[in-house]
Image (spheres, rainbow, N blue to C red):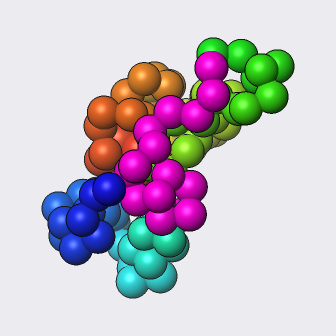
């Protein structure tokens, strides 16, 4: 389990600050903390299921449990300022700032 204060101060707040504008808010910080808590037990689980959606257990990744199709769609549709991110499902597991930005 990731320490809540550390996640907030060392990952979420800096990531949202880099994104700027409407993304940098207390409400966004709280939403991300609660999502991580609900989806991965604050980082206890970083990969859900196997590699196939048909396994019935999902394929979500990272502390926020994003599925690869959602990741691909998000990366195609959105950019934040100068940031354009490539879809990398494995990166959702090991790069907390990447996962937070998405």
| Label total for image | 0
Residue nearer the viewer, 67 or 21:
67
Q: Is residue 78 above or below residue 58?
A: below
Q: Position of residue 99 (x, y in %)?
A: 41, 44
Predominant secondary structure, magenta span: loop
Q: Residue at x 38, y 51 (%)?
A: 43
Q: Position of residue 91 (x, y in %)?
A: 37, 28
Q: Say which quadrant the N terminus sits in.
A: bottom left
Residue furthest top as drawn = 51
Horizontal arrangement in the rendering, residue 67 relative to residue 24 (left or right)? right
Q: Is residue 48 visible?
A: yes
Q: Position of residue 52 (x, y in %)?
A: 71, 16
Res. 9 image quadrant: bottom left
Does the magenta run of residues contain 60? no
Q: Is residue 84 visible?
A: no
Q: Position of residue 90 (x, y in %)?
A: 42, 23
Q: Is residue 59 above or below residue 101?
A: above
Q: Residue at x 31, y 45 (%)?
A: 96
Q: Residue at x 22, y 73 (%)?
A: 5
Horizontal arrangement in the rendering, residue 36 relative to residue 16 (left or right)? right
Res. 46 image quadrant: top left
Query: What's drawn in magenta, residue-wise?
Result: 35-50
Q: Is residue 52 above or below residue 42?
A: above
Q: Residue at x 56, y 55 (%)?
A: 39
Q: Is residue 91 above or below residue 32?
A: above
Does the magenta run of residues contain 38? yes
């Amino acid at each position: 389990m990731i320490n809540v204060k550390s996640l907030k101060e060392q990952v979420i707040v800096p990531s949202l600050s880099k994104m700027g504008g409407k993304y940098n808010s207390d409400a966004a910080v709280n939403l991300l903390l609660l999502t991580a808590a609900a989806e991965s037990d604050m980082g206890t689980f970083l990969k859900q299921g196997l590699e196939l959606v048909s396994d019935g257990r999902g394929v979500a990744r990272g502390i926020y449990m994003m599925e690869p199709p959602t990741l691909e769609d998000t990366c195609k549709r959105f950019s934040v300022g100068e940031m354009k991110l490539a879809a990398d499902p494995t990166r959702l597991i090991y790069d907390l700032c990447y996962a937070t930005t998405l």
